[in-house]
Amino acid sequence: MKRQYERPVIQKLNTGIMNKFGTRTEYEPYTHIDGVSVKSLIEQFGSPVFVMSERTIRENYRDAVRAFTTRYPKVQFAWSYKTNYLNAVCDVFHQEGSWAEVVSRFEYEKALHNGVPGNKIIFNGPDKTDDDLTVAIENNSPIHIDHLDELYRLTQLASDMAKRPNVAIRINMDTGVYPMWDRFGFNYENGAAWDAINKIMTSDHLNLVGLHTHIGTYMLSPSAYAAAATKMCDLALGIRRKYDKVIEYIDMGGGFASKNTLKGAYLRGSDTVPGIDEFAEAISSAFLNAEFKKGELPYLYLETGRALVDNAGFLLGSVISNKRLADGRRATIMDFGVNILFTSFWYDHKISPAQGFGTYTEDTVIYGPLCMNIDVVRENISLPPLKAGDHVVVHYVGAYNITQSMQFIALRPPVVMIDMQGKPHIIKKKEVLATLEKDEVTPDYLKEFKL
Ligand SMILES: *Cc1c(COP(=O)(O)O)cnc(C)c1O
């Protein structure tokens, strides 16, 4: 058999030398998840496969609850469905006591279907139709109003239905982090928030029970939350003064950064991202230092998503092939691409080999399998050379990848959850041709052809 020709290149190999971060630390083989071997998971479920750790989700959640409840007496979490709405994942959060936070009718139905009582489903988002609002009113769900058109439609519906729905308004404000997220809700500084409050408070049809904000996502600054919480408390106290009405809750949204590393960041997210205690400290202090009477402290609602689930998700995959690019760089082609790893557009994911390896590493580009030039999983990562068939583990993929995944060219992989006893369960099956063709309709006249 003829040997394949590879053009000779001279390539610098890094052998355990110091780089700007010190000695090499990132390239430990990652062979087991919660005691289950990566190899056996791939043998059983195929490659690629997403793996969720139930243990990590529960630990994250309990840690977040501890961080807030040790600092503030009235705290309630609501799971942000869009971060990861696989039912098994949502159910773990609900078992832990978390309500549901949804931003669309589809998510709303999912929460109901999971058994969350209507009054524990927080309905956010700019797009709620009359029908969506009617269902939410009937189920007594807290409706978080995004804009005046929604406020007016809701007033009309409430009047028609002779009901008085519980509502909150979403507030946006300057928190010192730019660009400002001012497209959702009513602005604090320009008076739009008070305008909406006055309209609701003078209407007999709506019951203003809360105030909501969600200041951004992957936020690195606890002080932005302190600024936001102070402004939210100011509004609540203003409502108490002007209308003699006690606001029941202030919902501070989500957005706490996970430990992922943003592209272009100098240091790794796992070393630099503030812990949940720092966010809890900033928010609780602002609430406690505001001038609420003790009996009138509002509930603190939190809709944190990515910080509770990102590190509980792993993507296991395999090397398809290696090649030299025209400039001599090593390229490794994996069996997973950006269609199922959407967050690789903004994160430098940590990627570990799943088996032992030698001592040298080489700068490598990691490509996915799609026939598309943008399918780059990592533009540059220093990895030990992997060979076809070797396995890798991509870390911190539990947030947004599954909900934003795109079916393109290939069928999407299964998702497995490892339970507290270390037993893997399928929580979403691998797609098959029929999954995709189920909703296609081909007119009969197109079905016959001769070639
Ligand atoms: C997306 C979203 C969240 C969760 O955000 P994370 O960054 O995942 O914590 C919470 N609340 C609202 C309104 C959202 O849109």
Image (cartoon, grey):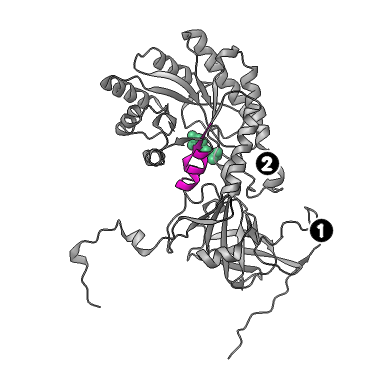
* Residue 340 in view, yes or no: no
Taking the image as shown, residue 418 lies to the left or right of residue 451, namely right
Q: Is residue 243 above or below residue 345?
A: above
By secondary structure, the bulk of the magenta-drawn segment is best described as helix
Q: Disc 2 on helix, strand or loop?
A: loop
Residue drawn at 55 percent across, 49 percent down: 398
Please rate how many residues cluster around mark 1, counting C-alpha atoms within 10 Å: few if below 14, some from 14 to 19, many from 20: few
Whether tag 2 and tag 1 are in contact, CB under 8 A, the answer is no
- The span picked out in magenta is 77-95
Q: Position of residue 4 (x, y in %)?
A: 60, 84
| Res 40 quadrant in image | bottom right
Q: Position of residue 402 (x, y in %)?
A: 49, 51
Q: Disc 1 on helix, strand or loop?
A: loop
The amino acid type of the residue labelled 2 equals Val
Please rate how many residues cluster around mark 2, counting C-alpha atoms within 10 Å: few if below 14, some from 14 to 19, many from 20: some
Task: Find disc 2 in the rendering and name its residue.
Answer: 273
Compute the Cα span from label 2 to label 1. Answer: 24 Å
